[in-house]
Amino acid sequence: MIWFWFYLSLGLGLWVTLGLRILPGGPAGKGDEVRADDNALIDQVRSTWRAQDGETAEQIFAKVSKVAHFVPKGWKLGPKIDSGELVVFLWTKRRSDEEKEGYTVTWVVVPDGTVKLVTPYAKPMDLGWQAFALSLIADDVTNRDRGANRRFLYDLGNFNFVTTAQGKLGDLLRRGRCIIGDPVKVHYSPTVDEQQTAKGGLWRVQLSVDDCDIQGRSYFNRDIIIFEKREGQDWNPQSFLAKRIETYAPDSWFDLADPKDQEASEAARKALAK
């Protein structure tokens, strides 16, 4: 039983062993009068859940399928649990993959009608389709999956879901004439540590910048940008360059930089080079 819930929370592809209720008549079980309540639950998730930019899950899946190894397979119902009803979306990396090779994204519909995405690896969806696509592609790169869409991974505009006091991250990096390299990570942690006092999980965006050329002057060759965000809060800069991006316009990122911050940045660069 412990392993059952472990795999369910991760949203891994154990479609049969999870006891999913298969609905006839298409992905959402349309036209099945016997399971009208089941259909209503699926429709509730499809119509009410929204990412922070207002997109529905199906809009996100449609866009992600065009840039990542993501083949939608449809909606199903999971088993009932104490906290509510589970609604599951099924997908595979390739059209030829069998069901046992698939993955799931799971929502819980609680008795008061609230719909919440509960699969940890899919939580970047809350930030929008680009964040979810980046997380999947970055995972493909880490796992050396053939055909990973690195072009999408290095497109500055795809990081505009991270907002700073100076503007959207991707726009700022473009103004700084920055080039993205490896590694890139978009990750969600349900719990930061055992001593965590703040409620909710944590999103973390990390990217490596190979070079920036501001007004024709190159300031560095490789640095890391790290932003973190707790549920219900704004993005927080965590690395030297992220703090400069949050505080200054691109043409002032390295003006009067604190020597201690520069030392920390240099240490981070050396760690990346190993």
Image: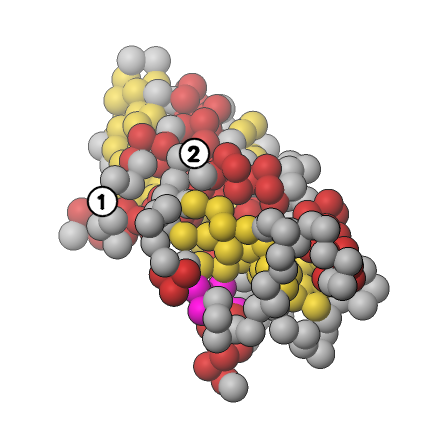
Residue 171 relative to residue 140: left or right: right
Question: Is residue 261 in sight in this rendering?
Answer: no
Residue denoted by label 2: 66
Quarter residue 240 falls in = top left
Quarter residue 173 falls in = top left
The location of residue 120, given as percent across then percent down, is 51, 61
x 70%, y 68%: residue: 85
Residue at the right extreme? 112
The image's colouring method is: secondary structure
Residue denoted by label 1: 146
Residue 56 versus residue 19: which sits nearer the camera?
19
Residue at the left extreme? 274
How far is disc 2 from disc 1 in space, using C-alphas?
16 Å
Q: Which mark is residue 67?
A: none
x 52%, y 73%: residue: 18
The location of residue 90, given as percent across then percent down, is 51, 55
In magenta segment, residue 8:
no
Q: Main secondary structure of the magenta part?
A: loop
Residue 53 relative to residue 130: left or right: right
Q: Which residues are magenta?
A: 9-14
Vertical order, 110 against 151 (above or below): below
The crowd level at tag 1 (other Cα within 10 Å; few <14, some 14-19, many 20+) is: few
The location of residue 77, given as percent across then percent down, is 63, 64
The crowd level at tag 2 (other Cα within 10 Å; few <14, some 14-19, many 20+) is: few
Which amino acid is tagged 2? Lys
The count of marks equals 2
Quarter residue 59 falls in = top right
Vertical order, 106 against 270 (above or below): below
User: Element under label 1?
Assistant: loop
The location of residue 65, given as percent across then percent down, is 45, 39
Residue 91 relative to residue 231: left or right: left
Which amino acid is tagged 1? Arg
